[in-house]
Amino acid sequence: MTALIKRSYRNISWLFIFLFVFALLGLLGYRLFNQESNKNARVPFTQPPPFELKLFDGYEWEGKNLISPAAVKGRPLVINFWASWCVPCRDEAPVLQKLYGEYAPKGVVFLGVTYQDRKEDSNAFLKRYGITYPNGPDTTGEISIEFGTTGIPETWFIGADGTVRRKYMLPMTEPILRNYLEVLVHE
């Protein structure tokens, strides 16, 4: 009788382990395959947190080595949080640079903010991908915290009126970025 009880407990234990793993895989699958919720992630505020970013050497915005959302008001702003160690960031870097070249003449300001990255590694990344739009390090992590950055890459879209339009929590592809930029430009 005791052997039968032990076997029953063992079977029930395996059943619970199976159900737990199945539920965990279901949640992971939902997150990965339900990209629509990631694309249009809810923004926790309507105005971007105030900050002033000191740009990397060799980068400037309108002749200054500092940039802030307040200084850009009146023009659409795209803020991309990235790091050199982020593999998806490597895929989206050429897309951001290409569309920066197309949309900067239309008044869109692009800004890259490094997230938990070493300055030397960030500079090597910028050089490797030929990034020419303003970029700077979030050395204290304060900007990332204020924006509620949960992972990278993460891209924020701010309208010319200074209102946050959306954030995108996956690597940018050219069609998605172009679509969001068209909306910003034609508001």
Image (tube, rainbow, N blue to C red):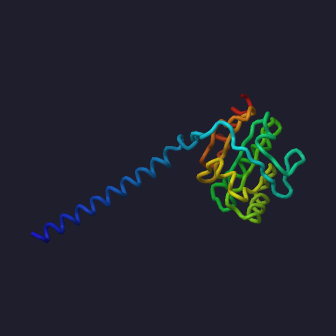
Residue at screen point 80% across, 39% down: 72
Q: Residue furthest bottom?
A: 3
Image quadrant holding the N terminus, namely bottom left
Name the foreground residue: 51 vs 154: 51
Residue at screen point 81% across, 54% down: 55
User: Which quadrant of the structure image shows residue 25?
Assistant: bottom left
- Label count reads 0
The image shows residue 97, relative to residue 9, as above or below, that is above
The image shows residue 7, relative to residue 71, as above or below, that is below
The image shows residue 99, relative to residue 13, as above or below, that is above
Residue at screen point 78% across, 36% down: 73
The image shows residue 74, relative to residue 10, as above or below, that is above
Q: Is residue 16 left or right of residue 52?
A: left
| Residue 51 drawn at (x, y percent) | 74, 47
Name the foreground residue: 48 vs 75: 48
Q: Residue furthest right?
A: 63
| Residue 139 drawn at (x, y percent) | 73, 59
User: Which quadrant of the structure image shows residue 71?
Assistant: top right
Image quadrant holding the C terminus, namely top right
| Residue 109 drawn at (x, y percent) | 78, 41
Residue at screen point 73% across, 44% down: 50
| Residue 177 drawn at (x, y percent) | 67, 41
Name the foreground residue: 95 vs 39: 39
Q: Residue furthest top?
A: 187
